[in-house]
Image (tube, rainbow, N blue to C red):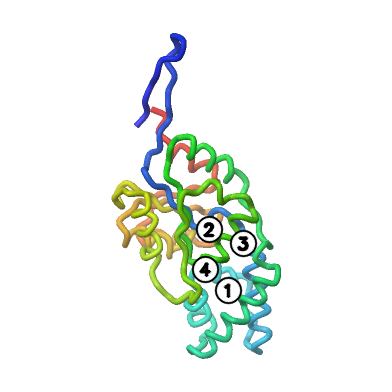
Amino acid sequence: MAETKQTKGITMMQVTPAYRAILFDLDGTLTNSGPGIMDSVRKTLAGMDKPALSESGLRKFIGPPLSTSFRTFCGMNEEETADAIRRYRLIYRGGNIFNASVYPGIPKLLTALRRAGAFLAVATSKPASMTKDVLNHFGLMPYFDFVSAADESERSRTKDTIILPAVKAAECSPAQAIMIGDTCFDAQGARLAGTSFIGVLYGFGSEAEMRKEGAEKFVRLPAELRPMLIDNG
C-alpha cells in the first residue's frame, strides 16, 4: 500500500512493496547461466561416453536438480547419476560457474525493491555453496536478505521445500510472498508452498509448462516486474 508524507509543503508518494517477501530463482531469472551449465553437461556426457544431447536437451538442465535431470533426460541409473554429478561439479567449478551474466535490468530492479522495503530472497535448486559464489561474483549478494538453496547432494525434491524457508525467514505467511522463476519447477513450488508466482519468459522454461502448474502472470523483461512488485498508489 502506498503512503504519503509532507516534505516542505510538498506531498510525496512513498512506494511500498506489493508483497512482504519477494523470492527469486537464480539460473534463468537473475542470471543467464546457460552457457556454463550446458557446456558442463556436454563435457560430462562426453567423458562418460554417453550420447550427446541437442541444444534444447541441454537447456532442460537449467533449473531442476542435477539428479533429476541426469535420470530423466539421459536415462541414467543411480550409480551413473552420482558419477555424472561428480564429473559435472569438477567441470563446472573449473570455470564454467562464472560463464554466465546478470540479465540486464536486474540490479536496477533489486535496488528499487530494496528501497521500497521488500524482503528479498533467492530460492534456488542450485547447491548453497555454488549459489553464494555466483551471487558474490556478480555483486548480487548485498541485495538479498536471505538465500535458500539446495544441499550439496542435489537430490530430487520439489521447489516448495526451498521456497518455504525463505518465507519463514521473512516472518510472513505464504500469501504475503511471491516467487519469481522461469520453469515449471518454480511454478509448481510456488503452488505447493501457497505463494503467488510470476513466470519470466526470458529464461529457459516455457510459458506452456508453467501454465500447467497454475502460472497465470508472465513477463518478458526484468523491467516489466517492477510495476507488478511495487505499489505506487
Measure how far apart labels 1 and 2 are at the Cα level.
20 Å
Q: Earlier in the sequence, mark 3 or mark 1?
A: 3
In the picture, the disc for residue 57 is: 1
- Residue 97, compared with residue 79, is above or below; it is above
| Circles 2 and 3 in contact, beta carbons < 8 Å | yes
- Residue 58, compared with residue 189, is above or below; it is below
Q: Earlier in the sequence, mark 3 or mark 4?
A: 3
- Residue 170, compared with residue 209, is above or below; it is above
Between 121 and 190, the residue placed more toward the observer is 121
Q: Secondary structure at mark 1?
A: helix
Relative horizontal placement of residue 138, taking residue 25 as reference (left or right): right
Dot 1 surroundings within 10 Å: few (below 14), some, or many (20 or more)?
few
Measure how far apart labels 4 and 1 are at the Cα level.
22 Å
Q: Earlier in the sequence, mark 4 or mark 2?
A: 2
Measure how far apart labels 3 and 1 are at the Cα level.
15 Å
Which image quadrant: the N terminus?
top left
Q: Amino acid at mark 3?
A: Ser
Between 228 and 211, the residue placed more toward the observer is 228
Q: Which residue is mark 3?
A: 33
Q: Which residue shows up at 61% across the image and 57% down it?
A: 32
Q: Please, which residue is most extreme toward the top here?
A: 9
Q: How far from the left and from the top, in percent, is residue 196? A: 35, 51
Q: Which residue is mark 4?
A: 127
Relative horizontal placement of residue 78, taking residue 177 as reference (left or right): right
Q: Which residue shows up at 40% across the image and 38% down it?
A: 17
In this rendering, does residue 52 appear at all?
A: yes
| Circles 4 and 1 in contact, beta carbons < 8 Å | no
